[in-house]
Image (cartoon, rainbow, N blue to C red):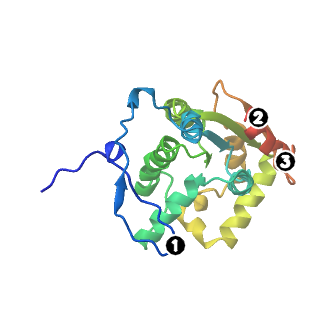
Amino acid sequence: MIAQQPLCQRPVEIPRWRPPGGKRSGRERLPSVELDRRTMTRPAASVAINDLVRKKPILVVVSGPPGAGKTTLAHRLARRIGCPAICRDEIKEGMVHAVGDFIAAPTDELTLRTLPTFFQVLELLLTAGVTTVAEAAFQDRLWRPHLRPLGELAEIRVVHCQIAAETAWDRIQQRQGESPTRRAHADAYLIDRHVHTVGHDSFDRVRLDVPECDVDTSDGYRPGLDEIVAFVNAGR
């Protein structure tokens, strides 16, 4: 095998000029030019791209009690931002679809599998530099220990969905009858309005030292979606 010279040191050949009708006189070799790599600088575009990669993505945490409209808001917010929405309930629904015949319970096997899967997906996306909306009805004892490590990968913003217990109860009952995917969850165990109200009113929201936004989801959004998007994008 014939050894080849490095591309930056290889002689460059160009045809010698000849007048129309003249004879070809061969090819002329230009002298070899060696480049000092120590003095070469990166193109400006390369520098800009690397600077962008070093910026942290944003993790938007949408939380609140069951029936607070979190999933709908998470998807609307993700569409406006231009990023994926990772919803805890949807992950479990996908697991139930794969299993087939399944009866949900408050602490069933798939519920236990969903928790680590949810945060592993978030870690994967954030490590890749993907701004992400994360939605779940977790309370502080589950959110905080899992979000703290993700704070090394992303800038975290928290959106707290707030709603009256009675309105949340009505929504839970309505979606249970209308959405076939709700069979993946333990909604059937929520049969007592009083028990629901106690759990709703004692909901322990996530507590982190990060920017927060409280959103009333009783009828639309207050503040509105534009303001929530501005909250997420602040400083960008």
Q: Earlier in the sequence, mark 2 or mark 1?
A: 1
Q: Which mark is residue 234?
A: 2
Residue at screen point 65% across, 58% down:
191
Residue at screen point 51% across, 29% down:
152
Say if residue 145 shows up in the picture: yes
Q: Which mark is residue 226?
A: 3
Q: Nearer the viewer, residue 155 or 34?
A: 34
Residue at image mark 1:
20
Q: How crowded is the residue under tag 2: few (<14 C-alpha within 10 Å), some, or many (20+)?
A: few
Question: Which x, y percent locates residue 195?
Answer: 67, 47
Q: Secondary structure at mark 2?
A: loop
Write down the quadrant of residue 234 in the picture.
Answer: top right
> Where 206 falls versus 31 (above or below)?
above
Separation of marks 2 and 3 at Cα, in angstroms: 12 Å
Separation of marks 1 and 3 at Cα, in angstroms: 69 Å
Inspect the image, locate mark 1, and give the three-letter code of the amino acid beneath it: Pro
Q: Say which quadrant the C terminus sits in.
A: top right
Numbered disc in front, either 2 or 1: 1
Inspect the image, locate mark 3, and give the three-letter code of the amino acid beneath it: Asp
> Where 212 falls versus 164 (above or below)?
above
Q: Secondary structure at mark 1?
A: loop
> How many numbered discs?
3
